[in-house]
Image (cartoon, coloured by chain):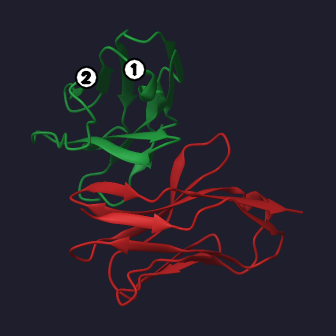
Amino acid sequence: GAGVSQSPSNKVTEKGKDVELRCDPISGHTALYWYRQSLGQGLEFLIYFQGNSAPDKSGLPSDRFSAERTGGSVSTLTIQRTQQEDSAVYLCASTRPGAKETQYFGPGTRLLVL
Amino acid sequence: GDSVTQMEGPVTLSEEAFLTINCTYTATGYPSLFWYVQYPGEGLQLLLKATKADDKGSNKGFEATYRKETTSFHLEKGSVQVSDSAVYFCALMEGGKLIFGQGTELSVKP
């Protein structure tokens, strides 16, 4: 079956521009996560959506970062006024109801800020 | 907060060698523990997990035992193959989200 998909796979942008990254979770998965993988910081949690509950935004590094999840499915991570230190691979993951311990990851979006 | 520390790489081994990648954690409770693997050009995938003390997770010949006394979850494999070359991440779950170690790159030479 289809896994978690992310788009675009690669994004190059100029410093100061806004970018939007998209995640399509596995159908039927109720929880959705965003992580960031960078050389300096390793793999770090950004934000977590669980059903209709308020998202856990505790990992967002600054107020330039935001995310939304529409209709309990697709999610968009937005980075405003991008900086060079935002360059990283942004990973999305989802889990089945009642099985949050097995997270299925997408292939990631590689973001390069020039 | 909770954290995970794993041995730094890269680790280079010959085929059929024994593998150990050390992982220790700091946590206020007893979180579930995981090993994830990222093969070249592929996405992150769950390799194995253990949800309570003394549990052993295993998959594809890899094993790790949840040791509460030493707060460790070391990854082992008795005989590695070239196809095991990848980056391995130890992680714990806190409040539904994963906290990862820095990752260990393994390279297996024929």
Point 36% across, 90% down: residue: B69
Total marks shown come to: 2
Examine the image and state in which quarter residue A27 appears: top left
Q: Nearer the viewer, residue A58 or A55?
A: A58
Residue under pointer 1: A83
Q: Tell me which amino acid carries mark 1.
A: Gln
Identify the residue at the far left of this view: A53
Question: Which residue is more in the foreground, A62 or B42?
Answer: A62
Mark 2 vs 1: CB contact within 8 A: yes
The residue at the point 68 percent across, 59 percent down is: B10
Which mark identifies residue B14?
none
The residue beneath circle 2 is A64
Q: Position of residue B16 (x, y in %)?
A: 82, 75
Looking at the rendered structure, the secondary structure element under dot 2 is loop
Q: What colour is chain B?
A: red
In space, the residues marked 2 and 1 are separated at their CA atoms by 10 Å
Quadrant of the snapshot with the N terminus of chain B: bottom left
Q: Classify 10 Å Cα crowding around label 1: few (below 14), some (14-19), many (20 and above).
A: some
